[in-house]
Amino acid sequence: MFLKNYIGDIFSSIKSLLTGMKLTGYYFTHLKEIVTEEYPDNRGTLKMAERFRGEVIMPHNENNEHRCTGCQACELACPNASIKIVTKQETQPDGKKKKRIDTFVYRLDMCTFCNLCVNACPSEAIVMGQKFEHSVYDKKQLKKILNFPNSKLMEGVEE
Amino acid sequence: MLLAPDHITEEGEFIINMGPQHPATHGVLHLKIWLDGETIKKIEPQLGYIHRSIEKMCESLSYRQFIYVTSRMDYLSAHMNNQACALAVEKGLQIEATPRAQAIRVLLGELTRLSSHLLWWASTGLDLGGITPFFYAFRERETINTILEETCGTRLTQNFIVPGGVMYDIHPDFQKKVKDLIKQFRANYHEYDEILTGNVIFQNRLKGVGYISKEDAISYGCTGPTARASGISCDIRKLAPYDGYDKLKFDEVILSGGDCWARYQVRMAEIIQSLNILEQLIDNIPEGDFLAKTKNVVKLNKGDIYQRVETARGELGVYIVSDGAATPYRCKFRSPNFSNLSAIPHIAKGAKIGDLMAIMATVDLVIPDIDR
Ligand code: SF4
Ligand code: SF4
């Protein structure tokens, strides 16, 4: 009796192993069903999702203008102080002085990509960018200034 | 870590340290194991290797901000953690998420549960010596992650849920992709049976191993699939429905085996239940807003709030004490993994050291949730 059970066990184990191996064998011979991607060889064709949160960016138009008014709502919304906005007073063509951003400091090394700053911005000045390969040799390079040099506020955003 | 000789109380006793860097603990958990030959006499879990003081951090974050940290507790159920916090804040504000937002939350929550159970299935196979299943589970998991990425923008730590609803509406392709996923999953489900569940060697490593009785599971505070495998009905989605779970038809999977095999089967059956929920809801997402109106600065009235949800690992409780300010006065999380871990020394007592892998795998611990 014991011997019969013992041999039966061996056979049922082999059978269940073969069932599993049949499956792996199927995929081994059906190359079309391969689902893995060959990153980084596929960099040329790799497209991230529209909403992918890679980094915070500030889009500028062709006249080097952005939409940021310097209201600092994003700075307040950020849970880990990754954003620091330095403002300055700028004289407008009509002689009035107005608050404008001087530098928009964004610390990619501290950012958790929570999207709260983008959500908080009333003038849609910042969005999430698709770039995700951020490794650099010096972490100082991860401290970025988002507004371009000599950029201006777009007309009509402030109203 | 070297232990002083006075830890050893008996002749022939032997202590080994498992972790904090051990692949089978899936994180930085340190178990001190007293052995008699191969038999486990006692286990002492040592915590704190990944303690980030999330509860304390919450005290300085606003009610909009503190949600995102909770994704880092049980990162595999990030969505459900966020949901628990958002629900707690909504309870305090006495508002409710819009019907559309509720449906989106449930859909995303069930997708997260699926992906979490898939990762558990993959790593259980891995812990018990089978590498191949891992790749099969990750095929489906990748599909889920792509769907989540398209709608939420992130794959693991979403932070998509805000008080009053969700951040954005679903992606236009969402419904079609989820339907494809359900079809793909149902078509491939038999492969899971063939490659791991039906394997006799695998079954023998789980059957009769790591038994915990109903009474013990209750007294150790086990929840989730771990407790349901011991015959306890503890699904918060059924007991205290939130976000419209009461309108959905699904079964609470309860088995009475209490061993590793029962825990395995509960999770496998829950995968099917999650698919059922997705199937019911995907064509019936109500029209309307995805975000209810809330004030810019959220302030809760003085008092305390408790909200619980069912994550992939059990009951998560969020307890907020408010003093009327814009940040919580005190925030406490009742995390499912902490209680489930506390049962492990009891479950593993008298078992063989090799079976500890099976026990750890089927209890399915996520260490950052234990330490917080
Ligand atoms: S994504 Fe989050 S962490 Fe990053 S800058 Fe914006 S608010 Fe701060
Ligand atoms: S990015 Fe938006 S929220 Fe931040 S300062 Fe500029 S306008 Fe204000």
Image (cartoon, rainbow, N blue to C red):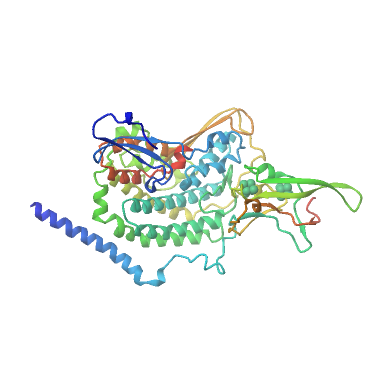
Closest to the observer: B83 or A57? Answer: A57
Is B372 left, or right, of A16 in this rendering?
right
Q: Residue furthest left?
A: A1
- Pick the residue in front: B121 or B321: B121
| Residue depicted at 33% across the width and 47% down the height | B266
- Residue A96's spot in the image, x, y percent? 89, 48
- Quadrant of res B209: top left
Q: In the figure, B230 relative to B321: above or below?
A: below
Q: Is residue B267 visible?
A: yes
**How many numbered circles does the render carry?**
0
Question: Along the line of sight, which residue is nearer the eye, A105 or A125?
Answer: A105
On the rendered structure, is A69 left or right of B197? right
The image quarter in which residue B180 lies: bottom left
| Residue B338, image x, y percentages | 42, 36
Question: Residue at the location (53% across, 56% down)?
Answer: B149
Residue B152 x %, y % = 56, 53
Task: Decide if residue B272 is in sight here.
Answer: no
| Relative image position of residue A84 (x, y in whole percent) | 71, 45
Looking at the image, residue B149 sits to the left or right of residue B35; the answer is right
Q: Is residue B141 depicted above or below A79 in this figure?
A: below
Camera-nearest residue between B353 and B218: B353
Q: Dividing the image into 4 quarters, which one contains the N terminus of chain B?
A: top left
Identity of the residue drawn at 46% across and 48% down: B76
